[in-house]
Image (cartoon, rainbow, N blue to C red):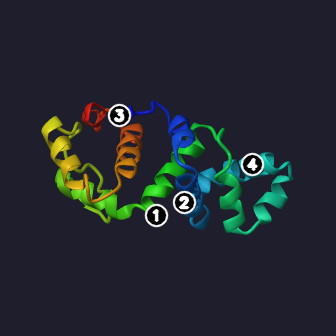
């Protein structure tokens, strides 16, 4: 499976349980700048007023949001990041440890490492997480990394 070139396309390809996990992580700790987009997507999906969607419990919001396939690029990207920072942080940490990039519990430190990851480093880091984590999770993570910074993570596309 090749990389998707947009977060919206990657979101559509996620398994329903992965979309639900991402939406649940987002609902627990929503990115403030994306909250109104999420509420609007929920309201449109259920044909309700945004005020009513905003008042729903987070678990209900997550269940609804997970069913919406047409989210727009920014919200899809935010949900993918929420998935990895919530449910899959150990994968982030393991991969970044293997690259030698400085991070704090899976979050890169500012100006950590080279502007572009070397092909050999990317290959070795992939070997370090392959088998420890499900292949599908690794692939979604690598695609998400690349979408966040295509220049730095370009070596991942070839893997």
Q: CA distance from mark 3 to mark 2?
A: 25 Å
For label 3, the crowd category at 10 Å Cα-Cα, with few meaning under 14, some 14 to 19 and many 20 or more, is some
Kindly identify the residue that appears in the image at 45 percent across and 63 percent down.
87
Observer-side mark, 4 or 2, equals: 2
Q: For marks 3 and 2, give the one nearer the viewer.
A: 2
For residue 11, say whether it is visible. Answer: yes
Q: Nearer the viewer, mark 1 or mark 4?
A: 1
The residue positioned 26% from the left and 49% from the top of the image is: 111
Q: CA distance from mark 4 to mark 2?
A: 20 Å
Disc 4 or 2, which lies upstream in sequence? 2
Spatial CA span between label 4 and label 3 = 29 Å
First in sequence, mark 4 or 3: give its number.
Answer: 4
Pointer 2 residue? 21
**Crowd class of label 1 (few under 14; some 14 to 19; many from 20; radius 10 Å):** some
Q: Position of residue 52 (x, y in %)?
A: 84, 60
- Mark nearer the N terminus (3 vs 1): 1
For mark 3, give the secondary structure: loop
x then y, percent, for residue 83? 48, 57
Residue that badge 3 annotates: 150
Q: Which circle marks residue 40 in the picture?
A: 4
Give the distance between the C-alpha atoms of the residues marked 3 and 1, in whole angstroms: 22 Å
Residue 118, horizontal then vertical, whole percent:
16, 37
Q: Which numbered disc flags the more N-terminal residue, 1 or 4? A: 4
Would you say the residues marked 1 and 2 are in contact, meaning their CB atoms lie under 8 Å apart? yes
Q: Which-is-in-front pick, marks 3 and 1?
A: 1
Q: Name the residue tied to disc 1.
A: 86
Side (left or right) of 56 relative to 8: right
Please tell me in which quadrant of the rendered image residue 147 appears.
top left
Say whether disc 3 or disc 2 marks the residue closer to the N-terminus: 2
In three-dimensional space, the C-alpha distance between marks 1 and 4, rounded to whole angstroms, equals 23 Å
């Amino acid at each position: 499976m090749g990389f998707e070139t947009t977060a919206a396309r990657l979101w559509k390809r996620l398994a329903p349980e992965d979309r639900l996990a991402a939406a649940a992580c987002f609902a627990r700790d929503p990115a403030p700048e994306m909250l109104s987009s999420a509420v609007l997507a929920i309201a449109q999906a259920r044909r309700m007023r945004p005020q009513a969607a905003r008042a729903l419990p987070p678990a209900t919001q997550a269940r609804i949001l997970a069913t919406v396939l047409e989210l727009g690029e920014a919200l899809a990207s935010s949900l993918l990041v929420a998935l990895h920072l919530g449910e899959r942080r150990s994968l982030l940490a393991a991969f970044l440890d293997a690259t030698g990039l400085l991070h704090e519990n899976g979050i890169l430190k500012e100006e950590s490492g080279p502007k572009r990851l070397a092909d050999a480093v990317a290959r070795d880091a992939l070997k370090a997480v392959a088998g420890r984590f499900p292949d599908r999770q690794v692939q979604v993570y690598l695609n998400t990394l690349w979408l966040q910074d295509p220049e730095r993570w370009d070596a991942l596309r070839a893997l």
